[in-house]
Image (cartoon, rainbow, N blue to C red):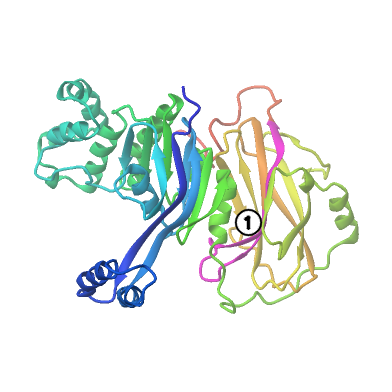
């Protein structure tokens, strides 16, 4: 296998002209053409070019984006609506041309960019399979050998022989995905398409995506489902207003994504009341056993800072080894380096694959924190029962300020990841209390 990157993007830029009025679409090109009849620095050239430029403005959907993606790499691309994600995917897929810069893809691309793309609505599903196969460079015979697998995966029954214009959005997505994953792509691009399907089909799709990546294909996955991005991808790119803001670990990328939304200045109100004074002995103990220096990642401007933290068992002993279903406490010292109106803090637990197992903080626990003045400190203790399967986990801690109108959105002032490992074991006799990711409340009885 070649060491050459599958995708190489260099200073990739895409601009769209926004015209002042419909007639400008005609007059501006005529003025530009007339300007080219004169020498570049002459007065007529400058005058005509100036008149042309006043009839439009350039909107940059993507500006100066550079990256490379290796073969077999799964990369998520995230960002708010209008950040340039879809434009970037279309440039990679070759359905758009860049204004400047370049993008090179060394392999066959299979892309799910929008529902219905590549389909003729008058053709049946079966006919569209052959149409898409021809687009990907397969012969009719080659697609015939794939037809049974495609129809079985799509699972739309007799509708495969009905015109696509009669399909629901879910059926359209099923067929499009079935084709995309059965044409042996070097690069599979998925742009939010899986949001349309039902949960059972989505699970089947995610399983197939993982199989394709394990076989060496490259994945670019765009979604607003941050859990799916962290589960599928080993890397993530964050776009904002057409610029690349971050390229790295999905967990860090997701936290920076939420960091793009800052609470409006002066909006909402702070929680009335005062924090209890920090106990000097407890503060000294947390500082003495501080675990934050061993973190794998940290970012934020630390307006609200994680000054120190320690993990202890139910008896107050610090450590990282715990028994399954036993209680653990995460003690955190927070320090305000600026006035914070709506402070919050929380913890996250990830499994060995990087999947988010659990996350909660003061907003989810309905534990309202009063405002913090600059220089003020507060001590919190997050107490959680380890209803987890035996294994190794990592811990992340954050200090943030939540949005008054949406407690699930806010800005991370200090985000620390990769603490641990937190080792959960089962030393008791008999069967494990449960199997799976986590324990749900459950009982049993006779009817």
Tell me where residue 390 sits by quadrant.
Answer: top right
- Residue 403 x %, y %: 56, 68
- Residue 52 x %, y %: 30, 74
- Residue 380 x %, y %: 75, 58
How many numbered marks have been drawn onto this rendered protein structure? Answer: 1
Please say if 394 is above or below 309: above
Which residue lies at the image location 55% right of the left edge and 44% below the top edge? 250
Please say if 264 is above or below 434: below
- Residue 415 x %, y %: 66, 54
Tell me where residue 428 sits by quadrant.
Answer: top right
Q: Is residue 406 magenta?
A: yes
Q: Nearer the viewer, residue 423 or 94?
A: 94
Residue 31 located left or right of residue 90? left
Which residue lies at the image location 43% right of the left edge and 24% below the top edge? 215
Residue 436 located left or right of residue 190? right
Please say if 278 is above or below 136: below
Would residue 72 be visible to someone looking at this image?
yes
Would residue 232 be visible to someone looking at this image?
no
Q: Secondary structure at mark 1?
A: strand
Which residue lies at the image location 51% right of the left edge and 52% below the top edge? 238
Q: Residues within 10 Å of mark 1 (few under 14, many from 20)?
A: some
Residue 442 located left or right of residue 134? right
Which residue lies at the image location 58% right of the left edge and 43% below the top edge? 249
Majority SS type along the magenta span: strand
Residue annotated with mark 1: 361
> Which quarter of the image is occupied by the C terminus?
top left
Q: Nearer the viewer, residue 78 or 16?
A: 16
Q: Is residue 30 magenta?
A: no
Start and end of the magenta stretch? 398-424
């Amino acid at each position: 296998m070649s060491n050459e990157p599958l995708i190489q993007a260099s200073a990739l830029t895409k601009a769209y002209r926004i015209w002042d009025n419909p007639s400008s679409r005609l007059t501006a090109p005529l003025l530009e053409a007339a300007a080219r009849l004169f020498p570049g620095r002459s007065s007529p050239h400058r005058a005509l070019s100036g008149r042309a430029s006043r009839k439009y403005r350039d909107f940059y959907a993507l500006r100066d984006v550079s990256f490379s993606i290796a073969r077999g790499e799964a990369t998520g691309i995230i960002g708010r609506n209008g950040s340039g994600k879809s434009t970037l995917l279309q440039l990679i897929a070759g359905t758009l041309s860049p204004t400047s810069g370049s993008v090179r893809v060394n392999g066959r691309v299979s892309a799910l960019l929008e529902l219905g793309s590549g389909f003729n609505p008058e053709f049946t599903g079966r006919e569209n399979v052959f149409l898409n196969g021809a687009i990907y460079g397969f012969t009719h015979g080659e697609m015939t050998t794939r037809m049974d697998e495609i129809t079985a995966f799509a699972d739309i029954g007799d509708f495969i022989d009905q015109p696509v214009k009669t399909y629901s959005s879910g059926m359209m997505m099923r067929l499009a995905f079935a084709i995309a994953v059965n044409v042996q792509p070097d690069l599979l691009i998925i742009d939010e398409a899986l949001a349309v399907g039902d949960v059972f089909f989505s699970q089947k799709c995610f399983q197939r995506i993982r199989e394709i990546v394990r076989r060496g294909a490259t994945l670019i996955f765009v979604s607003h489902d941050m859990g799916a991005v962290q589960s599928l991808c080993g890397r993530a790119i964050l776009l904002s207003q057409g610029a690349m803001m971050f390229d790295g670990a999905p967990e860090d990328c997701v936290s920076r994504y939420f960091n793009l939304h800052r609470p409006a200045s002066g909006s909402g109100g702070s929680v009335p009341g005062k924090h209890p004074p920090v106990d000097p002995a407890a503060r000294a103990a947390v500082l003495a056993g501080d675990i934050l220096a061993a973190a794998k990642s940290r970012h934020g401007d630390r307006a609200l800072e994680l000054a120190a933290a320690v993990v202890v068992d139910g008896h107050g002993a610090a450590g990282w080894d715990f028994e399954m279903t036993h209680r653990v406490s995460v003690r955190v010292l927070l320090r305000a380096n600026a006035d914070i109106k709506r402070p919050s803090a929380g913890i996250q637990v990830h499994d060995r694959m990087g999947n988010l197992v659990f996350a909660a903080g003061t907003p989810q626990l309905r534990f309202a924190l009063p405002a913090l003045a600059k220089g003020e400190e507060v001590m919190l203790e997050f107490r959680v029962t380890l209803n987890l399967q035996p294994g190794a986990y990592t811990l992340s801690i954050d200090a943030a300020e939540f949005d008054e109108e949406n407690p699930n959105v806010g800005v991370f002032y200090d985000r620390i990841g990769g603490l641990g490992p937190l080792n959960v074991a089962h030393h008791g006799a008999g069967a494990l209390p449960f199997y799976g990711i986590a324990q749900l409340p459950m009982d049993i009885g006779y009817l």
